Amino acid sequence: MGLNDLLYDPIRHNNWATGSLTRFCLDQKLTAEQLEITGVGTYGGILATLDHIVRCDGSYLRRIVDRPLDYVDSDTATDLETIEGWNADAGALWEVFLTQPIDVERVIIVDNNTRGTRVGIFIAQAINHANHHREQVCAILTGLGIEPPDIQAWEYAWESERIWDLPAGGVTG
């Protein structure tokens, strides 16, 4: 086991959950009106919030790995298909990140060169930020009468075979 192994599941779950929620919204064939409906305390509508999640994730990631992600600052009008592609791009770059030594104490300069913060904080923020906004999208879906997908870490574990049923009688030995 390597030093980065502890981050594999949280980072992979984070990217999987955003991708799963985006795919779910695509599969629902939501109308433009439904994609713009907001809820109390939400960032914005479904499309705006998913766009925000993926662009921010890319913004954190590009600073962590010091590689460009052109979509982060683009003025491109987004749709769910574009967001899904950007999330996949970020997922691939997260995988590159996970293969390299991580210096969580490395300083990243932010806020127009007025503050410094550690890489470990960027990782924590990426995961927390996305969880927060995904729940807002799920709340909007619920308000529309649509049961949102299960995007908890447990569901990720089932899909990625990181959890399994034990044989009848449990574990022996």
Image: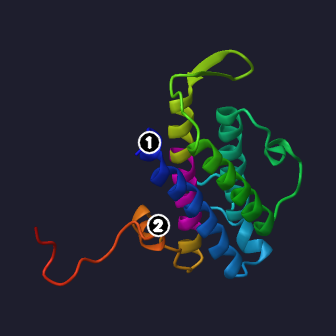
Residue 150 placement (x, y as % from top left):
47, 72
The residue carrying pointer 1 sits among few (fewer than 14), some (14 to 19) or many (20 or more) residues within 10 Å by Cα, namely few
| Residue 41 can be seen, yes or no | no
**At 66% across and 40% down in the image, what residue appears?**
61
- Name which quarter of the figure residue 100 lies in: top right
Q: Amino acid at mark 1?
A: Gly
| Residue 113 can be seen, yes or no | yes
Task: State the CA–CA distance, disc 2 to disc 1.
Answer: 22 Å
What residue is pinned by disc 2?
A: 156
- Name which quarter of the figure residue 97 lies in: top right
Task: Give SS at disc 1.
Answer: loop
Bounds of the magenta segment: 128-140
Count of numbered marks: 2
- Name which quarter of the figure residue 133 lies in: bottom right
Residue 41 placement (x, y as % from top left):
56, 53
What residue is pinned by disc 1?
A: 2
Task: Give SS at disc 2.
Answer: helix
Residue 21 placement (x, y as % from top left):
60, 68
